[in-house]
């Protein structure tokens, strides 16, 4: 399965390039197709292409076929800038989709603003893309700050006190560190050490000794792709058994494959629904399309591409025939869309109060006086990688970090509407006791939460207090 992502992605890239003659709606993407996060990017492309292929097979949008022009930037911000210029000025794309990397995305903002081009679903959780408001960026994921904050709190609740931080020395790393510091403050802890790492070529001979000398029980590793996988291997080679936790930009099957035997004891935060929740409408939809192409597994990275492209396609559909850049942005500025299972993505020019139908969803918001506010809701989850962390094989992406949110309930509006007032059902992830004892269980339970003092409600109340 893991090798399939790369081969399928290559085939999809060739297919989209070959279909240019019949395409009428051009979308652009600059991302790393050959560098340190290429494995993750290709999985994201797979998810995106599932949506594009389905739409085109059904006649396109308002009779117009979609083509995504993808250019490789190798995770280099300068190449991202040039690629984006080519896509906007030369290729005349209507919008951009799923650009990868924090410095890369920040670098292209002036071009987006100059030409009035929307970027939907950038594959980064940088707060700089949320605050201050970036008028042409429409985020479809939670923030790294939120993930890093909850990651630290999670480690503290398991009894870990000495937490080292390895931070990529770039805008993404600095951004996530702010969230981690909030987590340390709430946990009444201080980092055992903060080690800076070059974004693409970290010096592990300097980084690893800092963590081992601090006798770290856990390491929050803020970085991307091979910069993290090679670091984990170096840490293990030095004899460290510290728990490793990294962010959702690494939530990909390719990342686990690169870790190989070093994946034991690695946790990856996740911001989309658990891809093995086969009863979830979003997962059902994605899996059905994947299986039709001969692929039987999903990954968090694939789902990110799938969801972002669903948002793009729906916005194009609402824009009407012959969409222009300006009309698409106008559509997105007054947009609300259920991507599946009661998960809402909404954007508005007005600063409005976000929906409170789910207190467990992580809210990624952009606010600016008098301008658009985006309110995007997803699970804050995590992936436990490797046999040492998870009993399932291949490594299972479990939703255990959803327990780090202020509450556990995830309200399914469609399902709840069918329940009576006295018995309103709420889908609830409940930690199995085995997880607390062994931290090696992927067994989770979905249970009804009844009004009143049920045993489940009492259990959730107790768990909530431990994560408050």
Image (spheres, helix red, strand yellow):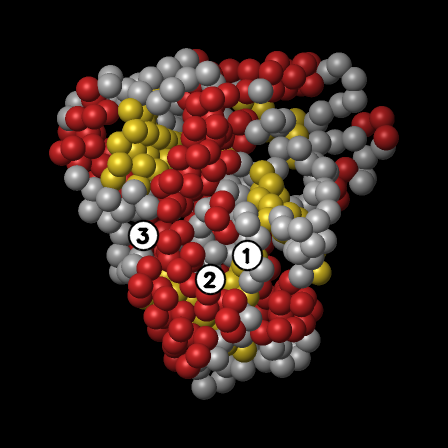
> Can you give x and y, in whole percent of width and height, for residue 265 in the image?
32, 27
Q: Decide: marks 1, 2 in contact (CB < 8 A)?
A: yes
- Can residue 95 be seen here? The reply is no
User: Mark 2, mark 3: which one is toward the viewer?
Assistant: 2
> Can you give x and y, in whole percent of width and height, for residue 443 in the image?
49, 26
Q: Name the residue under label 3.
A: 37
**Above-or-below relation of 345 to 356:** below
Whole-angstrom CA distance, mark 2 to mark 3, is: 21 Å
Q: Which mark is residue 109?
A: 2
Viewed as shown, does residue 329 lie left or right of 400? right
Mark 1 element type: loop
Among the two numbered marks 2 and 3 on one chain, the one whose residue lies closer to the N terminus: 3
The number of callouts visible is 3
Name the outermost residue toward the right: 421
- Can residue 22 be seen here? The reply is yes
> Can you give x and y, in whole percent of width and height, for residue 75 in the image?
31, 57
């Amino acid at each position: 399965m893991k090798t399939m992502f790369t081969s399928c992605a290559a085939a999809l890239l060739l297919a989209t390039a070959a279909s240019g003659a019949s395409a009428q709606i051009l979308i652009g993407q600059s991302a790393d197709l050959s560098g340190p996060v290429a494995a993750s990017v290709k999985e994201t492309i797979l998810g995106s292409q599932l949506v594009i292929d389905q739409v085109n097979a059904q006649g396109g949008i308002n009779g117009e076929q979609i083509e995504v022009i993808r250019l490789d930037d190798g995770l280099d911000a300068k190449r991202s800038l040039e690629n984006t210029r080519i896509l906007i000025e030369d290729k005349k794309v209507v919008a951009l989709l799923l650009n990868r990397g924090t410095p890369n995305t920040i670098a292209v903002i002036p071009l987006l603003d100059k030409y009035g081009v929307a970027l939907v679903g950038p594959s980064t959780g940088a707060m700089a893309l949320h605050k201050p408001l970036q008028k042409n960026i429409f985020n479809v994921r939670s923030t790294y700050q939120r993930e890093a904050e909850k990651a630290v709190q999670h480690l503290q609740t398991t009894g870990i006190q000495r937490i080292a931080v390895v931070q990529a020395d770039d805008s993404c790393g600095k951004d996530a560190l702010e969230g981690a510091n909030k987590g340390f403050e709430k946990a009444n802890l201080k980092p055992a050490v903060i080690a800076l790492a070059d974004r693409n070529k970290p010096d592990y001979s300097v980084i690893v000794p800092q963590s081992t000398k601090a006798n770290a029980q856990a390491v929050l590793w803020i970085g991307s792709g091979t910069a993290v996988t090679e670091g984990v291997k170096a840490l293990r080679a030095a004899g460290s058994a510290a728990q490793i936790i990294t962010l959702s930009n690494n939530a990909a099957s390719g990342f686990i494959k690169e870790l190989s035997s070093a994946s034991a004891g690695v946790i990856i935060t996740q911001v989309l629904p658990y891809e093995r929740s086969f009863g979830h409408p979003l997962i059902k939809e994605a899996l059905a399309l994947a299986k039709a192409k001969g692929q039987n597994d999903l990954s968090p990275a694939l789902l990110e591409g799938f969801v972002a492209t669903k948002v793009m396609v729906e916005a194009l559909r609402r824009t009407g025939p012959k969409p222009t850049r300006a009309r698409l942005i106008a559509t997105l500025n007054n947009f609300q869309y259920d991507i599946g299972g009661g998960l809402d993505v909404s954007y508005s020019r007005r600063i409005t109060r976000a929906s409170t139908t789910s207190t467990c969803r992580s809210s990624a918001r952009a606010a600016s006086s008098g301008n658009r506010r985006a309110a995007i809701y997803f699970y804050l989850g995590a992936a436990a990688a490797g046999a040492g962390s998870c009993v399932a094989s291949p490594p299972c992406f479990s939703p255990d970090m959803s327990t780090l949110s202020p509450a556990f309930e995830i309200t399914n509006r469609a399902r709840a509407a069918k329940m009576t007032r006295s018995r309103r059902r709420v889908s609830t992830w409940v930690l199995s006791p085995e997880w607390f004892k062994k931290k090696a269980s992927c067994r989770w339970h979905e249970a009804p939460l009844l009004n009143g003092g049920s045993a489940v409600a009492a259990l959730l109340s107790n768990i909530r207090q431990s994560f408050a």
